[in-house]
Image (spheres, helix red, strand yellow):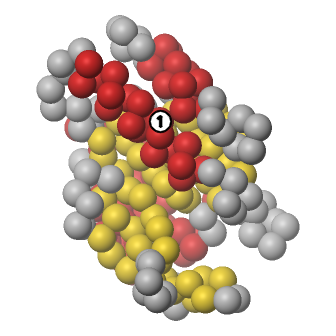
Amino acid sequence: MHVFVTGPPGSGKSTVVNKTIELISDRIAARDRAGFIVAGFITYKGVDGDPNIYIESASEPLKRYAFAQSGPGGASGFRADVLENEGAALLEDAPEADLICMDELGFMEDAAPAFKKRVMACLDGSVPIIGALREKRRGNEISWHLPIKAHPSVTVLRVDECNRDGLPSRIVNIIFGINGYAGF
């Protein structure tokens, strides 16, 4: 089972994804299961005046690539080649992982067909996914998200101020209860 959270910017999507991964890691460590591997990626804005938007390996924090810039009018300077090459490569090893992180899938990825193809291949696989979907762009549904949301193995949960603290436990139960991981 795969779970994606959605909600407006600042609603806590990435926080829910990160807390879910931490919760899983804590439970795994408590059971002495060595070698739990999280594959995939996180995206984030630079800090301290860094205008870049990065895609970074979920398992190797220093493996990051700038693929756009953030400014007052939103993202600009999008580099589809970074998602096509490095972004898709971050998902190459996903079938060997125990969990895949996809935080966040937005509108810019629509210009990266190889990346989208890797995302869809992961959805068709058996490795559980925790991810975040940008809600909408300028009031419009992000068209390439429709097959993700309609995938039979995907559950989409909306994040808001009232439910975000309880979502990580709920997501762990959805993912690992259905996938038969004992002890969750």
Residue 60 x/y as whole percent: 22, 57
Q: Identify the amino acid type marked 1.
A: Thr
Q: Is residue 86 left or right of residue 53?
A: left
Residue at the far front in the pictured view: 48
Q: In this view, does 93 lie to the left or right of 18?
A: left
Q: Hey, which quadrant is residue 79 in on the image?
A: bottom left
Task: Report the number of numbered marks.
Answer: 1
Residue at the far top in the pictured view: 182
Given residues 8 and 126, the one toward you in this image is 8
Q: Hey, which quadrant is residue 73 in on the image?
A: bottom right
The answer, for residue 127, to whether it is visible in the render is: no
Reply above or below: 29 against 94. above
Reply above or below: 12 against 137. above
Given residues 167 and 135, the one toward you in this image is 167
The answer, for residue 155, to whether it is visible in the render is: yes
Residue lying at 50% horizontally and 44% vertically, measured from the top left: 17
Q: In this view, does 2 lie to the left or right of 162?
A: left
Residue lying at 82% horizontally and 66% vertically, measured from the top left: 140
Residue lying at 67% horizontally and 48% vertically, measured from the top left: 6
Residue lying at 74% horizontally and 58% vertically, measured from the top left: 8
Residue 55 x/y as whole percent: 39, 68
Reply above or below: 174 against 49. above
Given residues 97 and 45, the one toward you in this image is 45
Residue 101 x/y as whole percent: 41, 46
Given residues 126 and 6, the one toward you in this image is 6
